[in-house]
Amino acid sequence: MKLAERLAQALAAGIRHIGQVAISPRAGAKGYELRHIDDEGQPESALQRHEGIAAARSISTWAADGHYRFTKGELSLVRGWRLLLDSPEELRQALDLFYPAAAGLWFAQADGRIEIEHLRAKLNRQTGMYRFARNINDETAQRLVREVCGPGNCCVKKILWQIDADTPLEDSEASRFDGVVGEIARAEAIPLLCREACNHFVAEARKAAKAK
Amino acid sequence: MSFTPKPGTALLIVGHGSTENPDSSTPYFEHADEIRQRGLFGEVHCCFWKEEPSMRESAYMIDADEVYVVPDFISEGYFTQEVIPRELQLEGPTTRRGGKTWHYTLPVGVHRSMTGLLLQRAKEVAPDASPAETTLFIVGHGTGLNQNSTKAIRDQVDLIKASGAGYAEVHDAFMEEQPFIAEWDKIAATPNVVVVPFFIADGLHSYQDIPVLLGIEAEPGEAASQREVFRHNPHHLRGKTLYYSSSIGTERNMADVILDQVADFDATHLS
């Protein structure tokens, strides 16, 4: 089944949230409406209306304080908008702009075909200027997870990887986070999944290795 | 070139991206949008080195069993020959992996149709400048690290010279190696000069660094999308009339070059 159809089924079955985005079927019309989760109770007149997929990129590019959201799992999505989409295919494309590949990763996890890459494998495959990143020890790696990942550091993805197959992440807010933002029903949310450390983490690992 | 639609296949455009400046990935999304609107592929996606989705994540967005991977890069080199194949786990022109068939094309910048795009951009930026009285510069970064990027530019210069476009002079020039773009007025003998940056995006180099080297600005400005006023051509500088273009990759017709690379791939590997 295509991702868009599967997404439509998930919505029909009650899925309403992904990251900081709330999704609802449009009353009396086909398609969907997206909002910031903190704007769910706002009257339509209080929100700026957008239509079409492209608005998803402009809405999700800058944080309220003006910084560039280059990691989309950041807990910094702006409020004050609603985005109208006409079809499951438009919904799929818009969600891939708000949270790239997140829906597909969730489906892959449900199917048991998500490929998880532990940190050592990720660092060891780096070349060029990032090859130094592999020189961090486990203690530094565990520290970086606490200092780079998790909602305390603005990333709201659920970490699926370990340091290596035998070394789990130490318990922390970052390692415990379940990928769902806010006090909302877990069964109604698509969790944001982190199947391998991002390149921002690799860059931080390189900095830490260089500092030593 | 007419393009035979591929409704059962996906197009995956690979870009560099940036953690500093969102303008860096704007052209890739625009190229994807242009091709999506033409309805030539079942799906069109982007993925990045420095942004999300990463190359490894991109497979999770794709429904189709057959995927064309097009590097939206200006030259062959470290990224197209090492990073992208590694990250997408490609083993040659065609790779079968994870239930999908992946076709890996050459980067857009080395395609011969880039020549027409460069000439079109040069004409657009300086519509009143007679080519016979104009020097055209194609500008790249230039470092000792990647000779391929300088080669791609020199190849384009040769193709433009041979095209009969009529420019008095056509030169390659670079930010960090000879011939230096900072010396544009000494290199060019003509009263008019047109400068086209051979980059995909308007990022630090084309909108901040090169304007300083040209003398248009005293110090690097803000990122392109944050500017209130875009530069106005022409600039009367150093006794000449200078026309400065945005990066060639911001041209929406770059979508045609992506399609050309897919068509060339088919002709070379699948026919």
Image (tube, coloured by chain):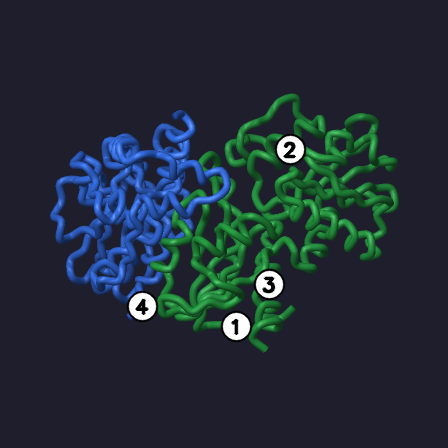
Chain colours: A blue, B green
- State the separation of the CA atoms marked 3 and 4: 27 Å
Q: Secondary structure at mark 3?
A: helix
Which numbered mark, 1 or 2, is in the foreground of this view?
Answer: 1
Residue contact at pointers 1 and 2, CB within 8 angstroms:
no
- State the separation of the CA atoms marked 4 and 1: 20 Å
Q: Is residue B2 toward the left or the right of residue A41 in the image?
A: right
For residue A2, the mark is 4
For residue B5, the mark is 1
- The answer to whether dots 3 and 4 both sit on one chain is no
Q: Earlier in the sequence, mark 3 or mark 2?
A: 2
Q: Looking at the image, which is closer to me, A73 or B265? A: B265
Q: Secondary structure at mark 4?
A: loop
Residue receiving disc 3 = B261
- State the separation of the CA atoms marked 1 and 2: 39 Å
Tell me which chain the residue with mark 2 is part of.
B
Residue receiving disc 2 = B231
The answer to whether any part of residue A99 appears in the image is: yes
* Mark 2: amino acid: Arg
For residue A172, the mark is none
* Mark 4: amino acid: Lys
